[in-house]
Amino acid sequence: MNRINHLFSNKEKDLLSIYFCAGHPTLEGTAEVIKTLEDNGVKMVEIGIPFSDPMADGVVIQNAATQALRNGMSLKVLFEQLKDIRKTVTIPLVLMGYLNPIMQFGFEHFCKQCTECGVDGMIIPDLPFKDYQEHYRIIAERYNLRIIMLITPETSEERVREIDEHTDGFIYMVSSASTTGAQQDFDSQKRNYFKRIEEMKLRNPRMVGFGISNKATFKAACEHASGAIIGSRFVTLLEEEKDPQQAITSLLNGLKE
């Protein structure tokens, strides 16, 4: 069974997934960050593929991606760093990045490399659902990879149900129609959106991302989903601390306060 499916088959709640950008703050730190996150109870890791022109990322992740590219990170380097990751890490790993570098690498070659490294799925924010259906889904399924699709408060019920029917793994619920970035709390509009999607009784589990940074936002996200994804806050801490253990310790302490 794909590790993503296995994770959600246990019906756990309050799952914590962490995003970081490969190659930031140092080029060589990718494997260490992943192992440290697993050792501290993180249930899934999203590994960002740095790109020069991201559409969905706020300034924190944009800056991290810029630094990673300057450090020399590329898909070729990333796969080389991940080739032995399954010797020490068991949790699901998801690559998150934009279509341009993946297409330049070659989509099937990308999928093949993911499988060889033990990557379980991918999130491609600028991949249109129609193109996923017509061109990419069959290739990803051939390699037992999950392509995770995003929904927002503006996504129609019809489209949400279509995504639910034709994808597998989990649905990424973007908390608001904005770029990534930490927020202090979620307003009633966002909470109603979480509740509305929960009441649709979808087949796929859901994880909430964008804006999760503290106890209040994490709790609000988990109330109506399987868990939450934290990105910008961890990327900031990793930049400040330069040490993944200190960064995740600070983050987990913030989720308790």
Image: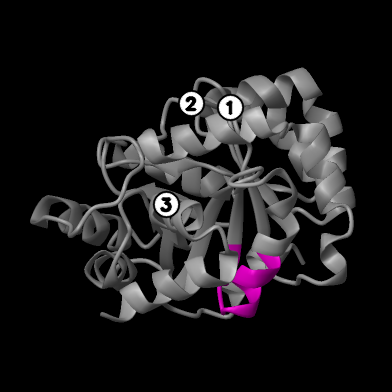
Of residues 195 and 21, the one drawn nearer to the viewer in this rendering:
21
Q: Distance from label 2 to label 3 (Cα)?
A: 18 Å
Of residues 239 and 173, the one drawn nearer to the viewer in this rendering:
239
Q: Position of residue 105 (x, y in %)?
A: 79, 24
Of residues 202 and 38, the one drawn nearer to the viewer in this rendering:
38
Disc nearest the viewer among 1 and 3: 3
Residue shown at 81% from the left, 52% from the top: 82
Which residue is the site of mark 1? 51
Which residue is the site of mark 3? 236
Extent of the magenta region? 34-44
- Crowding near pointer 1: few (<14 within 10 Å), some, many (20+)? many
Q: Could you say whether the residue bearing mark 3 is in a helix, strand or loop?
A: helix
Quarter of the image with the C terminus in it: bottom left
- Crowding near pointer 3: few (<14 within 10 Å), some, many (20+)? some
Q: Amino acid at mark 1?
A: Phe
Q: Position of residue 18 (x, y in %)?
A: 51, 60
